[in-house]
Amino acid sequence: MLHDRVLVKAESAEGERRSTGGIVIPATAQVGRRLSWAEVVAVGQNVRTVEAGDRVLYDPEDRAEVEVRAVMYVLMRERDVHAVAAERLQGSEDSTGLYL
């Protein structure tokens, strides 16, 4: 990876979802802008806030998909990450493990 690029693997496939009440929401339903979670696979040398293995929140509308060895990844800039959930932050005092 070069510069400020982050390579992530999306956690869930596009498709049907269930509401908290158990109602099935079809993939064709119009919903507002939703952010998605993904796992960081690789980072460039200038990335400062995320590391491989972290989970990041990103906008799936602004993405560039890349296929590597038959696996789909999303390539984005570090500035396109909205939040980071990291196991390495949960051990520190007064930390939730999530930072925006």
Image: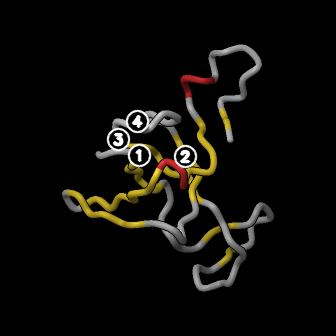
| Disc 1 to disc 4: CB gap under 8 Å | no
Real-space Cα separation, disc 3 to disc 4, in angstroms: 10 Å
Q: Which of marks 1 and 4 is in front?
A: 1
Q: Is residue 36 above or below residue 52?
A: below
**Given the image, on which type of amino acid does mark 4 rest?**
Ala
Q: Is mark 3 on a helix, strand or loop?
A: loop
Q: Name the residue under label 1.
A: 4
How crowded pointer 3 is (Cα within 10 Å; few <14, some 14-19, many 20+) is rated as some
Q: What residue type is labelled 3?
A: Gly
- From the viewer's side, name the closer residue of 21 and 64: 64
Mark pair 2, 4: CA separation = 10 Å
Q: Residue 52 carries which label?
A: 4
| Mark identifier at residue 56 | 2
What's the distance in space between the residues labelled 2 and 1, CA to CA? Answer: 15 Å
Q: How far apart are marks 1 and 4 (CA)?
A: 13 Å
Instruction: Say which amino acid is labelled 1.
Output: Asp
Task: Check the image and name the residue furthest to the left.
Answer: 69
Binning the other alpha carbons within 10 Å of mark 1 as few (below 14), some (14 to 19) or many (20 upward) gives some
Of the two numbered discs 2 and 3 on the same chain, state the one appearing first in sequence.
Answer: 3
The residue that disc 3 covers is 44
The quadrant of the picture occupied by the C terminus is: top right
Q: Which mark is residue 17?
A: none
Helix, strand or loop at label 1? It is: loop
Is tag 2's residue or tag 1's residue first in the polypeptide sequence?
1
SS assignment at label 4: loop
Disc 3 or 4, which lies upstream in sequence? Answer: 3
Which colour style is shown? secondary structure
Distance Cα–Cα, label 3 vs label 1: 5 Å
- Label 3 with label 1: CB-CB less than 8 Å: yes
Give me the residue at 63% from left, 61% from top.
35
Above or below: residue 99 compared with residue 9: above
Going 53% across and 66% down the picture, which residue do you hit?
Answer: 60
